Amino acid sequence: MTMEQWKQPFFNEKMPACALRDGMLSFCLVDESGEGKAYGGLKYEVFDSAGQPYKGHLNGDGFARVDGHCRGPVVLVFDAEFETKGTFYSTLQAREKYPLPITELQVRAEQTQFSDPTGKRTGLSHSRQNGDQFYQVEVSDFVRHIAHLPPVAPSPHRPQRHALKMMADLSFGPPQPTLFGVVLFPNNHTVLEVRPLRALRPMLSTQDDFCALNLYQLALFASLSYCSFGQVPPEKPQDEVRFPLDPSVGNLFAEQLAGHQEAWRVDPEQTQRFYPLYEEVPYSRRFEILPFDPALYPQNRPELGDQQEHPARSHFFDDEKDGTDTQAFITHHDEVILIAVRGTASAADGLRDANAHQVHFAEGVGKAHDGFYQAYRAVRKFVLRYLDQFHTGQRIVMCGHSLGGAIALLLAEGLRRIPDANYNILLYTYGAPRAADSAFTAGASTLVHHRIVNHNDPVPSVPAPWMNTTAKLWIPGAVTLFSAPTAGGLLFAAGLVRIGGNPYQHHGEQQHFMPIMLPDGTHSSVLWKPGCESIEEAGRNRALQVQGDMPDREGLIRQLVQYKQHFMTASYIPAAWATLRRWQQAVDSNGPLVTQREFDLLDHALATMRKQLQDKRRELTRHRPANDRTYAYHEPLNAEIDRLNSSRERLQTLRWRRLEARDIYGSHAHSVTLQPCLKRWFRHRENQTRTQIASIPPATQSELGRAQPLDIDSIQ
């Protein structure tokens, strides 16, 4: 049928809209179960072909009938503002920055559920049979402002957009500058199935205590911090923004999770699927990416030029242009503000020098690595601006890998020290180097920091403690020690001794992945708290032995950061996943955290380390200068031998330790959303491994070759 044939029954050449008021139609809003009660009493407006409005309320079954409108199609809208004060929604409507235009329809849709737990449209609703027309619609179809709403889900039963455009072209319909709504045709009963407004939200524990849930989830977010934000256009947007790039920060939060899609990719070269544990929440309680709507928010207007705000500028920090090459992202919901710091990933400038100079940590006490401190200062203003706008008492959960972990530590302590801010911070870092001296570590003792170290990751051993506050040098003998280590030796002898100033020192409670081999020949690991430095120094030694001699510091650092045990997708994430599965199985079976065989393997490794320390002490004693009774190596070596003895005692407790749900899931241990979340997670075959103890998924060859580099000095 042509446009002229369609118009003939209703219009003539003298009249753009038919004045005859004998039209009739009815419609019903239903959820995916086919019930209309969720929308009962909802206020609607219908605009006929002459622009005349008809207002009313749906009955208790979500049904309405309109009689006497001008002959022809009508436009249906549900744009009434949500008006209940003192609710979570009213706080979003009233917030100072980016108040949200939340409608009553949105609130109702957030209270409905999907028929298919995956969130996919079924197309099989029995309500289709109850009407002349059937549409699967979105909240965004009926409201004026849609920038804060999710992207439209594909469906074969979408209302035809050309019908709305046709009415606009004919110059009738509602008087608004931009036509919106759904076109209904006369003498028909139309069933409108509204897609639930539900989103997926990665679960994060807000408790201080370490838990396997956060270990795994934050490993994924630390890796995601290496991705771009993915906004199109990236700068100076005019009327809308999109996030098509997968993986990217914007795509994950604004597209996939907002659209109830279970995303798993956090690295462009990733092939293994590592799904976060997602809880389904009302859409407004998701991790938010701010809307972009120049008509609604003056700060979004393109004419502001360099001062224009848009999502990439609010959520994503990239300091490549200013020299520190620091990158971070931030987002939030009503309980958590999430910050992930990447640090530097570019080796374009190379290592500028061999300096590990320390500078005063102005926001607290002690001294910090100069380059790390500069990066922290660069990102601090960005984070504070976001917190000033959206922090309402949430727990601030931070994470970072490699150098990003060092920067995240300084940022966490800097935020914690702000007077009267009352920021409650929880920090997880992965393979982070030492960021500051012992005075800083003591001053930050109340900061909750869980420091994750892979057994063979050499990066946590740098900067070495002896790299002092003033000298650009290698201490005498250090080059020889590092470039030609004795077989099986530990690189700690110089590392435990300082030359001047306070030594570099790690902060936080160490959680260590100790590798083991299972009876079937696959690899796994045991996560525990050894409480000693030797293991980290051994990781550096092992990396050098594998990679070859490198006497100059620039080559050393380059080797260390490209060692495969430092990678996220090839090392830390698989080990975190295996730990989560191991702990889940231990709780399910009410068994110990380690078997007797595993204990014997770990105990043998620690006994070997202890012997190496003792051998090194005897060697140093033989070469002690005459008349030197205070040879500096003895005291730190003796202290480390004592710490290794304590570590073996800690290991003993693992044989008897029984885990509880709180050890795994933290503050979510007794949440009503936990079981649905686990059911969703276990639907994926990758999470269904049920060996005696979960093995670590082997990395693919492409992932083994992908470095997450730490350029320890190029940011100075």
Image (cartoon, rainbow, N blue to C red):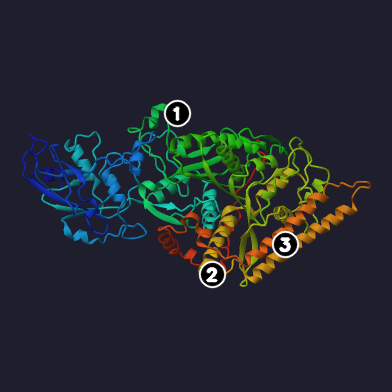
The answer to whether marks 3 and 1 mark residues whose Cβ atoms lie closer than 8 Å is no
Q: Give the quarter of the image for residue 447.
A: top right
Residue 222 location, x and y as percent?
54, 49
Residue type at the position of mark 3: Leu
Q: Mark 3 falls on what kind of element? A: helix
Q: Residue beneath label 3, please?
A: 606
Residue type at the position of mark 1: Gln
Foreground disc of the pair 2, 1: 2
Q: Residue beneath label 2, please?
A: 590
Residue 490 visible (yes or no): no
**Looking at this view, is 673 or 187 the one in front?**
673
Looking at marks 2 and 1 on the same chain, the residue that comes earlier in the sequence is marked by 1
Q: Residue beneath label 1, please?
A: 307
Crowding around mark 2 (Cα neighbors within 10 Å: few <14, some 14 to 19, many 20+) is few
**Looking at this view, is 164 or 656 the one in front?**
656
| Residue 621 left/right relative to 694 | right
